[in-house]
Amino acid sequence: MIADTPESASERPTMSDAEAEAEATADPAASRSRRLWVPLVVALVALLLVAGAAWTAVAVRKEQQAQDRDDDALAAGREAAVAFTSYDYRHIDDDLDRVASRSTGDFRQQFTKALGALSAAIKKAHGVSLGEVSQAGIVRSTDDTAVVIAAVDATITNRSTQGESTRRYRLQITLNLVDDDWLISDISPVA
């Protein structure tokens, strides 16, 4: 039979915590490597956080710019609807010029060509119309075009009517962004 050694477990030499750590880090290259990795990992995490914050800020800014653009286009569409449905025979040329000056492209050419006949007909009838947008919204938009639908109620008087009458228009207004200004490129009725 083999006998136990005379030393009991309590008599065996033990290592202090400092000695155990020193033995575990006896390899100086491993110790240096660990000291380099910790700051690199911290720097990488910080870089990822900054990049994520920057990406979020850019996305929020783009969204805000798109919202601002749509707000401007909607306001221009509302103004176009009012200008198109509001006139007074006593200053009809100014009223029609207001629409023409807010127009572009083929629409501007066609509208300008029709100004003389339109002005004469409104003067002859003593026509007065006051348009008011009751609802409007953007159907679609890009960076340089927008389509607005507007519901307009126009109060109309002229020589052929007894008193005021109300006409309801539903207009589709196409706008183009020209030199930071939304201009009418088409107006058509919506059935």
Image (cartoon, rainbow, N blue to C red):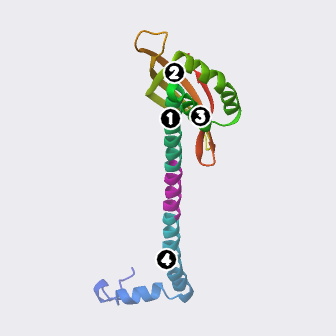
Does the magenta segment cover residue 54? Answer: yes
- Is residue 190 something one can see in this rendering? no
Residue to which mark 1 is pinned: 79
Give the spatial CA distance, label 3 vs label 1: 14 Å
- Which of the two labelled residues, at mark 2 and mark 1, occupies the earlier sequence position? 1
Residue at the image point whose x is 49% and y is 57% from the top: 57
Asked if residue 62 is positioned above or below residue 112 in the image, the reply reads below
Residue at the image point whose x is 56% and y is 17% from the top: 124
Near mark 4 (Cα within 10 A), the count class, few <14, some 14-19 or many ≥20, is few
Give the spatial CA distance, label 4 vs label 2: 66 Å
Residue at the image point whose x is 51% and y is 80% from the top: 34
- Which of the two labelled residues, at mark 3 and mark 1, occupies the earlier sequence position? 1
Three-letter code, disc 4: Val
Looking at the picture, how far across and down is residue 127, in whole percent? 50, 19
Residue to which mark 4 is pinned: 38
Q: Disc 3 or disc 1, which is closer to the eye?
A: 3
Secondary structure under tag 1 reads helix
Q: Disc 1 or disc 4, which is closer to the eye?
A: 1
- Which of the two labelled residues, at mark 3 and mark 4, occupies the earlier sequence position? 4
Residue to which mark 2 is pinned: 170
- Which of the two labelled residues, at mark 1 and mark 4, occupies the earlier sequence position? 4
Residue nearer the viewer, 68 or 177: 177
Chain part drawn in magenta = 51-63
Three-letter code, disc 2: Arg
Residue to which mark 3 is pinned: 97
Residue at the image point whose x is 48% and y is 86% from the top: 25
- Which of the two labelled residues, at mark 4 and mark 2, occupies the earlier sequence position? 4
